[in-house]
Image (cartoon, rainbow, N blue to C red):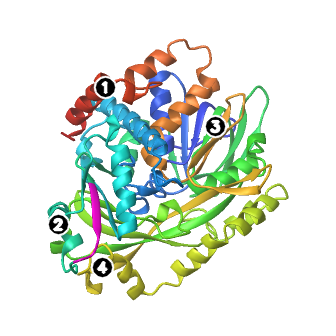
Amino acid sequence: MGIGPGEEFDVVLIGAGIMSATLGTLLRYLAPELSVAIFESRDTVASESSEAWNNAGTGHAALCELNYTPEKPDGTVGIDKAVNINEQFQESLAFWTYLVEQGKLAEPEGFIRRVPHMSFVTSEKNAAFLRARYEAMSRHPLFSSMQYTEDPAKIAEWAPLLMDGRAGGEKLAATRVERGTDVNFGSLTRKLLANFSDSLHLRHKVVKVRRASDRRWHVTVMNEATGVSAEIVSRFVFIGSGGAALLLLQDAGLKAGVGYGGFPVSGQWLRCTNQQVIERHAAKVYGKASVGAPPMSVPHLDTRVIDGKKELLFGPFAGFSTKFLKSGSYLDLIKSVTPGNLYPLLKAGYDNIPLTKYLIGEVMQTPEQRLESLRVFMPTARREDWELAIAGQRVQIIKPHHEKGGVLEFGTEVIREGDGSIAALLGASPGASTAVSIMLGMIGNGVNVLEGREDVAAKLQAIVPSLGKKLAEEPALLEEITRRSNAALGLG
């Protein structure tokens, strides 16, 4: 369906990924009469960060990701970030559960499956850290089902590939949570956007966003097939186009985004091609990241189900590209440099020299070096059973800092205008797994197209019962949410 010059919409969503799909679904539920237009420059939805091969696919609930539980100077382990991420993922589960129960999201087994989440470490030092982590987390209601072992036989029972061919006498430790998940965010995005067939415009690239009068925005959209551009008007604009969001954010001139820059990090997987090996593993096993590694590069031996087929991946291995999207331009990074963000970029780069050295090392790795990294998890790994696959492109946030000049941030951040007429999402992990929480927070901070509606809070509470609550303080609510999601999503 074409777009005509001067057309007006209540909502424009830029990028057809999990973020826009989630926000669009929420807005349509809260205000069905809103007119919505979704623009995607490629010919398919979920083709960048949301696509199954381009992200970890772990339902990030902090069950196994060790970078969410930092070790403190006194040897104890902080779990506040892990608790926050788990509660955010509970909101995702509740939202998906509601949609399934209401018949709005069919065949949940097509996007979510139960896969145990494990952490695995070697050496006395790392085992002591994992033990302290387990002791801190297992006391919390959200992580009470976590198991811990240093017994090689038990580890072999949980994940045989970890122990095959491993020499005796090595100090090992592992934790396991049975009710972990594997989420195909590409499939989920396609299911959600199937309800927007009248609003979705593929091969339409937003090239300009400019403020109009009366809290509206002029949005210039180019039809990639014809090369013809049209300027439309929208009351609310969401820029959810992955790494490319930074360039559009700068173009829109948002005051809140002044001085922001981006640092692109690419990724690669080792993908198993031996079906017998794939069938012997049924878990997501995370280890400790290398010194200087970004969070997206925490190594894991990962069972995935992609398009109905069981897969086994290891990685990701970090890389560097000046593109902001896999389908982007090598000039993206250069185009993003402005007089306002040049100093924060240079200062953050100087302060993160170890990260630069790490990325150079990753880029220069040989196939044998990648295989050696895999053998830390799987000692019997053979080169002929694995092939290299390209993962997604992420853009980490660099933001101005009053003392440091510029800081490199890991995570996601919503940049918005105070009048609630436009917002942009920047950053990466845990990203997709917390999309529901991110969008609920954005709506809670104010979206102009929902102003004057007194039923918003009640409607949101109906679909996400834990909204605004601490599940650790309400065990009955936690039990009810778990029961419902087990039943609706097939996680029991």
Residue on which disc 2 sits: 156
Q: Is residue 306 found left or right of 247 in the rendered image?
A: left
Q: Residue furthest right?
A: 339
Residue type, numbered disc 1: Pro
Residue 333 picture location, percent across and down: 69, 66
Mark 4 and mark 1: Cα distance apart in space? 44 Å
Residue on which disc 3 sits: 237
Q: Earlier in the sequence, mark 3 or mark 2?
A: 2
Q: Which residues are magenta?
A: 169-175
Q: Is residue 487 found left or right of 200 in the rendered image?
A: left
Indicate which disc residue 341 carries. none
Residue type, numbered disc 4: Trp
* Residue at image location 78% in from the left, 52% down from the top: 259
Quadrant for residue 394, please give it: bottom right
Q: Is residue 297 found left or right of 405 in the rendered image?
A: left
Q: Quadrant of the C terminus?
A: top left
* Foreground label between 4 and 3: 4
Residue 52 visible (yes or no): no
* Foreground label between 3 and 2: 2
Q: Earlier in the sequence, mark 4 or mark 3?
A: 3
Mark 4 and mark 3: Cα distance apart in space? 43 Å
Q: Is residue 451 found left or right of 349 in the rendered image?
A: left
Instruction: Kindly check if marks 4 and 3 are in contact, taking CB atoms under 8 A apart as contact.
Output: no
